Image (cartoon, helix red, strand yellow):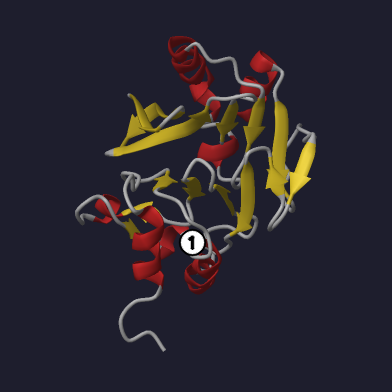
Amino acid sequence: MLTEPATDVYDVTLAESNGGRYRLFVFDGDAPTLVDAGLEGTTDAAADALADLGIEPERLVVTHGDGDHVGGLPGLVERYDLETWLPEGLDVEGHEPDHRFGDGDDVGRFTAVHTPGHAPEHHSLVDEDAGVAVIGDALFGADSRGLPEGHFVLPPAYYSEDLHTAEESLEKLVEYDFDVGLVYHGESVTEDASEKLDAFVNFAGKP
């Protein structure tokens, strides 16, 4: 499945399992960019989608080190000779990145926002000019927990190293303005995403 949640931004489904999807995001433009790399066995699916789009990627940016985000990195780098950007503190076996980034750094078109909790090195990526944020696994789509889509929820504690830190780290994302918030599990939020995030973080009665 291939959708376009924002202009020249593509949500590519690489595989499906247990009712969920494994995906990557493609940003077309002056330096076509992949955000995350899918699983080790999904490189061909990514290449097929890129061929359908007529996009030759030049850059790969990683949000964090879970296997469904970095497993396909070696295969995609080899196939497209990609410039790679990895968060500080993340090592991918057998790969030395071209660039490292941390909180507040410019990563091509994005600003990196350190949002730990799900994983210590987790970063979200915000492109305010385009009104799009790749929130990674800092948040899931609400439908992933049986709620109506179009809103965010925290990832389950089962998948988080520190759920308290995961919630606290969202305070940083509230400072940014974006209409579309892209997540990897559940449906992304494609309208009023930063307003919905603010309502989620600054809930009624919050001390």
In the rendered image, residue 116, in percent from the top left (x then y), is placed at 58, 62
Mark 1: give few (<14), some (14-19) or many (20+) Cα within 10 Å: some
- Could you tell me if residue 118 is visible in this image? yes
Point 29% across, 56% down: residue: 151
In the rendered image, residue 158, in percent from the top left (x then y), is placed at 42, 61
**Quadrant of the frame with the C terminus:** bottom left
Q: Is residue 40 above or below residue 21?
A: above
Q: Residue lying farthest front?
A: 129
Point 34% across, 31% down: residue: 16
The quarter of the displayed image where residue 70 is located: top right
- Circle 1: residue type: Ser
**Quadrant of the frame with the N terminus:** top left
Helix, strand or loop at mark 1: loop
Viewer-side residue, 21 vs 193: 193
Q: Is residue 122 above or below residue 57?
A: below
Point 63% across, 60% down: residue: 120
The quarter of the displayed image where residue 9 is located: top left
Position of 167 with respect to 195 (left or right) is right
Q: Is residue 50 above or below residue 185?
A: above
- Could you tell me if residue 92 is visible in this image? no
In the rendered image, residue 126, in percent from the top left (x then y), is placed at 55, 48
Q: Is residue 126 above or below residue 104?
A: above
Q: Which residue is mark 1?
A: 160
In the rendered image, residue 38, in percent from the top left (x then y), is placed at 51, 32
